[in-house]
Each structure stands twice: as C-alpha cells, then as structure tokens.
Image: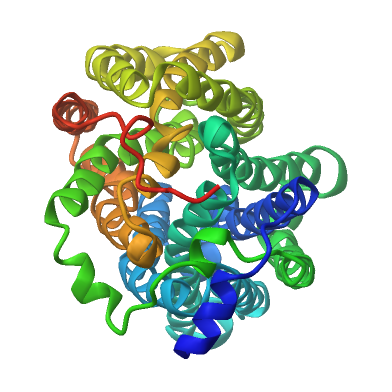
Amino acid sequence: MSSSTAELATRAPAITAGQRLRSIFSGSIGNLVEWYDWYVYSAFSLYFAHVFFPASDQTTQLLNTSGIFAVGFLMRPLGGWLLGTFADRRGRKAALLLSVFMMSLGSLIIGLSPGYAQIGVAAPILLVLARLLQGLSIGGEYGTSATYLSEMAPRESRGFWSSIQYVTLVAGQLIALALLVVLQQFLLSTEQLHDWGWRIPFLIGALLAVIAVIIRRNMDETASFKKAKLLESPLRTLMRHPREVLTVIGLTMGGTLAFYTYTTYMQKFLVNSAGMSKADATSISTAALFVYALLQPAFGALSDRIGRRPLLIGFGELGALLTYPILSTLKEVHDWWQAFGLIMTALIIVSGYTSINAVVKAELFPTEIRAIGVGLPYALALSVFGGTAEYVALWFKKIGHEDYFYWYVTACIACSLLVYIGMRDTRRHSRIVED
C-alpha cells in the first residue's frame, strides 16, 4: 500500500455500531463454517478410517487417521505465518476470504476421493494433501479471526465479543456432530455410513464455505488496520517481541491440549476406552459441546469485569488438580449422565482459557504485527500439543499405559499456570488502542 493510500485509509470515517455488528457477524459465520469443515474429519473418522487405511484393528485405523489429523496441524504454523503476514499487509478481510476458500477446496477433495480399494496408496496421499491445505487455512484463520474480532469489538466489551470466536469454533464442531447424529439415527444405516455416507458432510462443508465467502465480502475492515503503519517484513518485526511470543506459546500449551482432549478426542475415548456405543458417545459429546458453547460469552463478559488473568489462573489451578481424577473416572463410567457430567465439569474448567485466549493474545501485540503475532506462535504451540493430543492418547493406550496421557495433560496445564501467574493482565495493559 502506498503512503498516499495509507493516509486516505487513516482519514476513513469510523464505522457505525450497525456496521460493527454486521462485520462481527460476517466474520463469525465464516469462522463457524471453517471450523465445521475442520472438525468433520474428526467427527466422522470412525466411519471412514477403513476406507483409507484397511486394517483389522480399530485402534490402528484410528491411529492412522489421527496421525493425519496431527499432520494437518503441522501446516498451521505455516498458515499462521503466511496468512498472518498477508493479513498484516493486505488487511484482515482479504486474509479471511482467502482462508475460507482454501478450507472449501480441502473438504471437496476429501468428499470426492476414491478409497484404498480403488486407487491404493494414492487414497491416503490425497487425504494427507487435503488436510495439509486445510491446515494452512485454519492456521491463518485463527490468528486473523482473533485479531479481527478483537479490533472490531468495543473496548469495554472486548472480552465478550471476542469470545464469539470460540462459540463459532465449538458450534462448527457441534454442527459436525449433530449432522452425524442425524445421519446415524434417522437417515442412514451403519453400513451406509461406512460405505458412502461419511462423504456427505465434506460435500456440505465445501458448499457452506462458498456461502461464507459471499457473506465475508460484506465485512468492513477494522479501524486499527486502516490506521496502522504497514511493514515490509512483519515476521522480522515479530522477532523483536520475544516475551510476547513466548507468552502466547506458554499460555496456549496447556489450554489447547485440554481443549482437544475434552472435545475432538473425547468421542473416541468414550468408544475405545470406556466401551460406550458410537451413538451414545456422539450424543454425549454433542450435548456437552452445546452447553460449553453457551458458556463462552458468559466467561468473556466476566473477563471484562474482573480481568483476563484471574480466569486463566482458575483454569490452570483446577485443570492441574482435576484432570487425572476426571479422565480416570470417565474411563470406568458407562452411564450416559455420569459421562456427560464429568465431561461438562472439565469443559467448564477449560472455559477459563478458551473464552478469552483470543483477546489476550491480540492485546499483547501492536497493530502492525497483530495477526501474525497471534497466529504464528499459537499455531506452533497448537501443532505440538493440541494437534497431537489424539495421537499421543491412542499411542499410550496401545502400549498399555493410557493413564500416562492423563499425567501428560496435567503437566502441560501446570506449565501454562506458571505463565498465567507471571504475566500482566492484558485487559489493563492492552495494545489495542482503536475502538
């Protein structure tokens, strides 16, 4: 952008309250569709694992599909870097449009891919390529979306509005699970789901992503970006903020591992470890996620009143104390309501992190590197801890020491707690100066 263009952008009129709400809605809808596309893979992997990885052992099949789930996460730092740089140089809106298009293409590839029986090893290769593309997309989506919502929200309610990101994130997963319930209970037999029905949600996701692109075209750019000084190398500038980068990695470590443990992995845990039926595991996960999504704005609003740091410390302390008891008890539970209660308890604790982690990260960085500052270090921590959660859990189970995973989650949350204790409260020390 030339200096004259930047000056015009600086003099651009402030957006109205109506435009602000419309833009938050447009960004959130696109975020929901992206996360639906991302989570459909995990929700339906119980039904398509045999198509791409034929094997007689269910744990081995799930291990293979979980491995590809983790591979998708390995692309997220690259996506956080590339799309974060793009967002800091070309605008939040442009980056959000690009990310949802990439996600749509990945879903289309998976939905149309032949299986191992038809094309051999090319089938899992296509699956990997699709997930790599989606990993790039979601890696850029998180940081840019967190930046956009935080910059677009009014100062006094920034925690509340930015929490919408996890509402839509969870809603995307919830819709994926709800679709699975509908297909399981009302439309298709188990055999049909295993044979071809698993393709339906991927094709729906590709179509929804096209609709999201159309909706996002009506978004306004944030005032912060319009007034920002654009940099030639946001990554180089980011390296001058090592404390903030390490803070993002540290505060993400335990939170993202706990989140993926109690959301994406929990459906498989209930089937593969607790011995519950696939239908019960899906309905329990769906019900818990629905309540969990409703909690996010409440926790976000609470952070606007008491600060972000107390919520993070509450998550860290309770998570470190209760993770092992919750998971070890859950493994022995066979009653629907008991399982729901334990998972819900865990998700209430995790809400102290998920509801505000986006705004906390955005408030750490100046405008000109905010998207890459939020997206890149978050994606690095996510790839190491969140993306491997299922794989690590299944690997410990396979070698006969499943409880080691419970201690692993506990230790990571405890490490993040040390970061929460040592950091400043970003509500009082925010670097977002434009409303």
Q: Residue furthest right?
A: 187
The structure residue drawn at horizontal position 54% and vertical position 56%, both measured from the top left corner, is 148
Q: Residue 361: x percent and y percent? A: 35, 46
Camera-side residue: 184 or 298? 298
The structure residue drawn at horizontal position 61% and vertical position 60%, both measured from the top left corner, is 34
Judge whether 185 appears above or below 55 on screen: above
Q: Is residue 241 left or right of residue 137?
A: left
Judge whether 148 appears above or below 314 on screen: below
Is residue 102 something that shows in the picture? no
Judge whether 370 appears above or below 268 on screen: below
Q: How many marks?
A: 0
Q: Residue 323: x percent and y percent? A: 29, 19
Camera-side residue: 98 or 410? 98
Q: Is residue 322 left or right of residue 275?
A: left
Is residue 302 something that shows in the picture? yes
The structure residue drawn at horizontal position 60% and vertical position 70%, both measured from the top left corner, is 11
Camera-side residue: 238 or 180? 238
Q: Residue 155: x percent and y percent? A: 53, 37
Q: Residue 137: x percent and y percent? A: 50, 70
